[in-house]
Amino acid sequence: MSSPEPILRVEGLSKRYGAFEALRGLTFSIAPGETVGMLGRNGAGKSTAIRILCGLARPSAGQAWLRGEPMLGTRSVAHRRLIGAVVEAPRFYPQLSGRRNLLQLARLLGVDAARVEALLARVELTERADVAFGRYSMGMKQRLGLAAAFLHRPALAILDEPTTGLDPVGQRQVRDLIRQLAGSEGVSTLLCSHQLDEVAELCGRALVLERGALILEQPLAAGGIAAVEACFREMAARTRAEGAA
C-alpha cells in the first residue's frame, strides 16, 4: 500500500549570501497530520528555511511543494492560503484589540466571525479580546499569534520558536495549545525550535540542522531522543576541537 502524498515536500533548498551558505541542499517532507520539529543551534539555518517556506526570502536553489503544487518562485499566492505561520514575534496592529485584529485577518481569508470567537475562546483570550494588542503580555501575544495561524484551518502550520521569551507557565500554555490545535484540526505542523524537550513533547520526528545542512532526520519514539542528544554532543565536541585547533 503506497504512503499518502506529503503535505509538504522540500528538495535541495539552498540559500547563499555571497560566499556564505546559510542553507545547503535541505530535503525533507511532512505527511498529513504529522508534526515535525526542526532543531539546531543558533545560525544552523532553521530561520532561513522557515523564512523561505513562508515567502519572506527567496532560495538560491531548490523547490518546495505544498499538496503537490510548487510554492517557491511562482506568482501564484494560492498556496499561502494553505499555510498558517508564527514567524519570530507575532505582529498585529498595536492600536487594535485582539478581536479586531483577528476579524481583519478573517475578512482577508474569507473566514466567518464565529471562527474568530471560537479561537479566541480556545486560546483563552475571550476576556481580553477587546484590549489593544499593544497592551498584551508576551504570552497573550503568542496565543493570539497561534489563533491567527490556525484561523483558516490551514493545511500546514509553520511555527518559529513559539515559546521564546515566555516563562515556564507561559511555555506550558503555548505547548498545550499547539498540541490541541494541531491535533483537533488535523493540521500538519513544522515546529522550529532550539529546545529538544519542546520538540520531544510535541513532535514525532526531528530534523537536526548544522551549518545550513540537514545532518540527522530522526523519529523520536523508541530511543530517538537519545540519538538526537548524541548528535548535539557530537556537534559540541567538533566545535570545541575546531576552537582548539
Image (cartoon, rainbow, N blue to C red):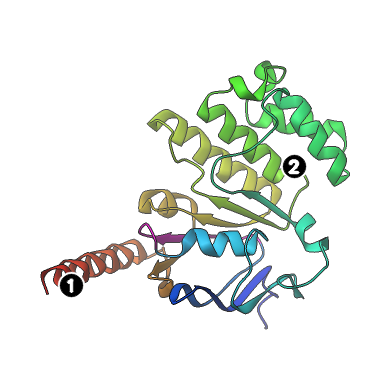
Question: Can residue 165 be seen at all in this image of the molecule?
Answer: yes
Residue 179, relative to residue 45: is it above or below?
above
**For residue 218, side relative to residue 150 (left or right):** left
Residue picked out by circle 2? 151
Tell me the quadrant of the picture where the C terminus can be found.
Answer: bottom left
Q: Which residues are magenta?
A: 33-43
Depth check, front residue: 111 or 219: 111
The mark closer to the camera, 2 or 1, is: 1
Depth check, front residue: 165 or 1: 165
Distance from disc 2 to disc 1, alpha carbons, whole Å, reads 46 Å
Depth check, front residue: 212 or 10: 212
The amino acid type of the residue labelled 2 equals: Leu
| Res 182 label | none
Residue lying furthest front: 18
Residue picked out by circle 1? 242
Choose top left, top right, bottom left or bottom right for residue 41: bottom left
The local secondary structure at tag 2 comes to: loop
